[in-house]
Amino acid sequence: MKSINDIFIREKDFAETMDGKVLPFLKETIEDGYITAGDGLKLYYQKLIHPNEKAAVVICHGFCEFTMKYAETMYYFYEMGYSVFAIDHRGHGLSGREVDGYSKVHVNHFSDYINDFNDFVHKIVISNSKTGRLILFAHSMGGGIGALYLEKHPDIFERAILSSPMIQLSTGTINKMVVRLLKTMSYIPFFTKRYLPGHHDYDHEYKYPRCSVMSKPRYAFQYNEREREKGYRTSGGTYGWSREAFNVSKKILKNASLIKIPVIIMQASLDTLVMPEAQEKFTRLVPTCTLRHFEGSKHEIFNATDDIILDYYNEVFNFIEGIR
């Protein structure tokens, strides 16, 4: 029986293996297309259908991310016997925008992400999965989307992995008064679709190691993808996006007890983007939820060091297969 240990790509081999094996395989295997959201926005998706599917894994990406950032993850899921589905959220990747340009991330209502994701699940995932057994894999902002989705649609997925989920966005050193001011300003039409202070257009800067990725070749892969494709150059959020991101925390925690399925939270000890206390509270509120803490990892646990990443994926597959 195949193990993640047999196919795991170590950092020293990452660039060569991705270029020589993984990306050619994905290019040949991935089918892609668009669905139309309720408001007419075009949403891009990818699917990899395994001929002997154990279950279908649905990837829900984070803020300023895109489907191909998960090329390595998609490859592992497929090699382990799972079909894979992924969508670019509105305002991200190759999906449509509600603002001009490719850099700025804006959403009018966080519920738009939930509705888009539900359309994707019903129009593409359920109709193409061979088994009808769905597993959610959601990271960061995608974890916030995933948590709300599980509360609103408790019977769609069998299990869920929430990786560094945005149950509550971290405000860093910004005090509560400033946060309240920013939220108030977000309702003023002049500010709603403007960048938050400190956010700006994509500037081509190579930010490693000042980022949430610990693996240099994995960061280089992401960077090169952004340089290659303009749609991947999301760079900062608007006042409107931040308001919706701040407000979503109460909604997630209020209805966490409605989640019926087993959930695992992957928590990074060095995370500066989301609040660990909110993840821990969520874990206590969900009837069947466990928390796995990864010491020494930044926000993107699947892009940390070899030992952490391998431990991470072992947890993922053990959880999916019911060993944990």
Image (cartoon, grey):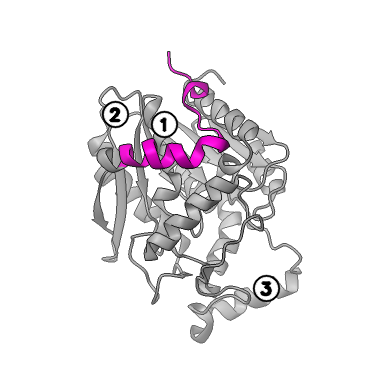
272 displayed left or right of 107: right
Residue range highlighted in magenta: 1-26
Magenta-highlighted stretch: main secondary structure?
Answer: helix
The quadrant of the rendering that contains the N terminus is top left
Q: Residue at x 34, y 60 (%)?
A: 94
The residue wearing badge 3 is 180
The residue wearing badge 2 is 50
Q: Position of residue 97 (x, y in %)?
A: 36, 69
As measured in the structure, the alpha-carbon distance from the residue carrying label 2 to the one carrying label 1 is 10 Å
Q: Is residue 259 visible?
A: no
Q: Is residue 277 visible?
A: yes
Q: How many marks?
A: 3
SS at mark 3 in the image: helix
The residue wearing badge 1 is 77
Q: Which badge, 2 or 1, is on the more N-terminal residue?
A: 2
**Amino acid type, mark 2:** His
Query: In terms of image quadrants, where is residue 177?
Result: bottom right
Which of the numbered marks, if any, corresponds to residue 116? none
Mark 2 neighbour class, 10 Å CA radius: few under 14, some 14 to 19, many 20 or more = many
Image: 97 above or below 155: below
Q: Residue 29 or 61: which is nearer the viewer?
A: 29
Image: 288 above or below 278: above
